[in-house]
Each structure stands twice: as C-alpha cells, then as structure tokens.
Amino acid sequence: VRFQVAASNSPDGPFTFVGPDGTAATFFTTSGASLSQFNGYRYLKYRAYLSTTDTTVTPVLDDVTVCFENIFDTSLAVAAASGTYGGTTTLSATLTAGGSAVSGATIDFSLNGTYVGSAPTDASGVATLSGVSLAGIDANAYPGGVSASFAGTSSYAPSTDTNTLTVTPAPSTTTVTCPTSVLYDGMAQTPCTAGYTTVDGLSGSLSVSYSDNTNPGTATASASYPGDANHL
C-alpha cells in the first residue's frame, strides 16, 4: 500500500496529491511519515494505492490514522523602550493568539542583540521585565534595538517582534564651593573650586570663572560642565 496526500484551505480544493518530497512522483510507504509540509492548511485528503503480485486476492485497506497537533498562530507585539545612559528601562510585550491573550507564556527580551532576561505573560498576555540595565549602551536611538521572542509550545506557534530603543544622555550636577569671605589684598581673589558628578558615577574638577573678584564687595564664581555624547 502506498499513499499520497493533498491539502487545501478550501473544502473544494484545489487538492494536489504528492509524496514526501512534495511531488507526485513519490509516495508515503511507511508509518509515522511526517506531514509537516501540509502545516497551515485546514483540509487534508489522502489517496491510497493498493497493489499485489498475488492475482488470487484483492488488497483491502482496513484503517488509516492521521495524527496532528492543533497549533495556534501567535502574534507578539513588543513596546518601544527608553531610558537614560547608565540607567535602567522597563521592557514589555503582549502575546495573543486569534486576538485573545495568551497567559503563562515565557517571553525572552534582548537589547541590541544581547539577551537581558525573560518574563511570563499575565492574564492580559502582557510580559513585563523591569530594571533592565542600559550600562554600556551609548545615548542614541536604535531602531529594532528592543526585541522579544516567544519560543512556542505544543499548542502555540513561536513569534517574535522588535521595536525602537532610545537612550538619552544622563544628567550631571555641577558644584562650585567658595569660602564665605576672603580678605582684600588688592589682588584678584580665586579661592573657589568646582567639580561635576553624573548619575552613572563619573566625577571630576572644573575651571572656575570669576567676576568682580578684585575690589571689596560681592564677587561671583561660576563653572560649567560641557558634557559629552552620553552626558548633559
């Protein structure tokens, strides 16, 4: 006995009967043969070819069993993410199947291709991963920098999605420190110091600029941190 199989999304076809290599020139001849080439079709038909070398008997087909798993297609939508340089961000993705939420599924997240963790979907199909570090990612916009993936299960097909990651420059603080007063000696007074710190741990000294610091009275001291690509 040999078989060929055909599939279609319509009960009226068209149905093209083929063997394991997808052509009409081959036949399924063993039990347990894969029918994966027909995944995604709603209707399946088989055709049996019976033959014998004994002219005194007529071949009879008693039973045919086709095994299948009902796997639902899924859709994964990952949200865009943002944060400051050296800080953290929160990642979120929603998994649905046929428009309905899929709960209890594990979603894997990556930033710029680097895996950063996973989270389960809740009753609304939403997976949320908080406190994800942005260390080492320069301030910039990265189209496709956020990615989420669902590996699939025996009931749900896998799916993936990407969105934009935006990293903004980190803020800084500039501090000028001066004594309450100094004695007038006819010379320009420069008693102050200045420095900067950033939220991601950088620090350093700065030059101080003065005005009205020669004669008696109130003087002004100021300093400015110019920043860089990753710091304001």
Image (tube, rainbow, N blue to C red):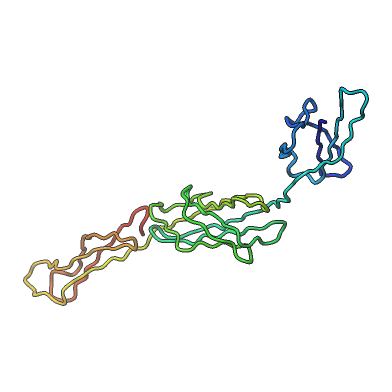
Give whichever of 69, 167 is nearer the camera: 69
Q: Quadrant of residue 226?
A: bottom left
The location of residue 191, given as percent across then percent down, is 14, 68
Q: Quadrant of residue 62?
A: top right
State left or right for residue 90 relative to residue 35.
Answer: left
- Rendered residue at 84%/41% (across/down): 63
34 lies above or below 90:
above
Give whichever of 168, 9 is nearer the camera: 9
The location of residue 164, given as percent across then percent down, is 53, 53
Give whichever of 230, 222 is nearer the camera: 230
State left or right for residue 39 relative to residue 150.
Answer: right
On the rendered image, what quadrant is the C terminus found in?
A: bottom left
94 lies above or below 58:
below
The location of residue 39, given as percent across then percent down, is 73, 43
Q: Quadrant of residue 26?
A: top right
On the rendered image, what quadrant is the N terminus found in?
A: top right
- Rendered residue at 48%/47% (across/down): 113
